[in-house]
Image (spheres, helix red, strand yellow):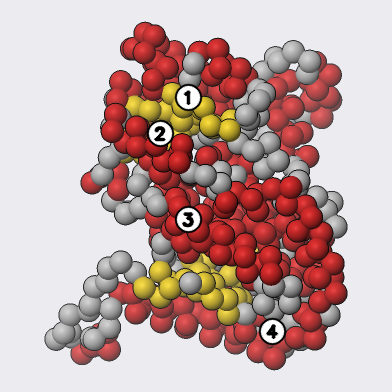
Amino acid sequence: MIKIDYTNAMAETIGERDGILREELLSFRHFVVETHTLIQKEKERKFYFCKLPYQDTTEIKEFAEHIRENFEYFVVIGIGGSSLGAKMLFESLTDLNYNIEKSPKFFLLENVDPEKFDSILRQIDIKKTCFNVVTKSGSTVETIANFSIILSMLKKELGDRYREHLVFTTDPEKGFLRKFGASEGIKMFGIPPKVGGRFSVLSPVGLLPAAVLGIDIDQLLAGAKKMDLVCSIEEHVEHNPAYLIALIHYITNMRRGKTISVMMPYAEKLASFVDWYRQLWAESLGKDGLGQTPVKAIGTVDQHSQIQLYRDGIRDKIITFIQVDKMNTDYSIPDELPEDIAYLTGHSLHEILNKELLGTKAALIKSKVPNITVILDEINPYNIGMLIYMYELATGFSGYLYKINPFDQPAVEEGKNFTYALMGRKGYEEKLEEFKELYREKYRIEVQ
């Protein structure tokens, strides 16, 4: 179950300067109805991610079981949308001590940081490891660079048997990885061509790693289906969770000057959900001088590092709290405490966590800082599936609000093109010349 409390984003709670008038929210009702119709029509094209909850998971589950039975380590090689979703599912839906207590042990090779690469190699036995290489284009520089090193190591250690230690998740028809996998007879899963990387967590990109880790992917998709059903039927501004979240952020951004969107879960297991959200929100909506900057915070830790700024700094933020009503375990504060701290007696850690959240919200209300709370009754695959789908649809809907395309990333592509040029890739000679014109190191300081 998911609930959304947006009381503290409304003008009647924090005033009209920072809060939203209910009439203002309802004034979008005609826009919502029109856009809702467009989205339903686009589910075969731009909004194809909406169809992912209805896929058959049989092949994924069968191959995941094969990996679980034959390997002691499972490593995803990918970056951005090809890794953040898997990381989020792993950290949200497995035990925090998973890699200590369970198998196959899970690792991510994301960046091309050689020390991080080396640290993972020192934790695994390559002869007992399955590597899942994930890139939709099949040519992502970081992914292919890391893969090329692993491929060489596998061939050296295993000879022709190296193929058994690889599984590719990539475009179903084109790209280097698809071509290489087909020629070498490597097991492959397809990423639907109409689904962009940051919207792909409910495809084999996220589902295969999740299934390997023992996560119930059918429940994950069931939650996404439920959210799709609610959001497909309900057109009312205040009854559609995805549209509501999008509108609250849009209004506070464009009419109240809230250029920063902070997400602050009061549950350590949801820290990587924020990382996933940051890419989704930033890469989709940061275009044409528009969009909000997503910022990560964790309750209660960042009450002691960021709340000072949120309450008393520039009034440019809207905060989303994520609250969890029930956790898998809890610890009670002991009796017979010294008098100065006796007020803690009879309380538990989870109770304190949520009371800290209430106190923080009250303080923010006092400072007129708009905030909403997404409440989960518990962290489970069903609820995480709902949460994922809700934010994906909210992001897509926001594209219509901002009048931008939320499914491309032209600014990212430019950086990739310069990288290709610097690495000497054929066809990028003009980009190299452009780089030389743009890039200067004129002002520097050096301290030894």
Q: Residue at x 38, y 40 (%)?
A: 212
Q: CA distance from mark 2 to mark 3?
A: 18 Å
Q: Position of residue 372 (x, y in %)?
A: 60, 76
Counting residues from the start of the chain, the first of labels 1 and 2 encountered is: 2
Q: Does the rendering let one see residue 114?
A: no
For badge 2, the amino acid type reads Phe
Q: Which mark is residue 63?
A: 2
Residue pointed to by mark 3: 220
Element assignment for label 3? helix
Q: Earlier in the sequence, mark 2 or mark 3?
A: 2
Label 2 sits on a secondary structure element that is helix
Q: Label 4 amino acid?
A: Met
Q: Which residue is mark 1?
A: 187
- Give the CA separation, mark 4 to mark 3: 32 Å
N-terminal-most mark, 4 or 3:
4
Q: Is residue 109 above or below residue 269?
A: above
The 10 Å Cα crowd at callout 2, few under 14, some 14 to 19, many 20 or more, is some
Circles 1, 2 touching at the beta carbon (< 8 Å): yes
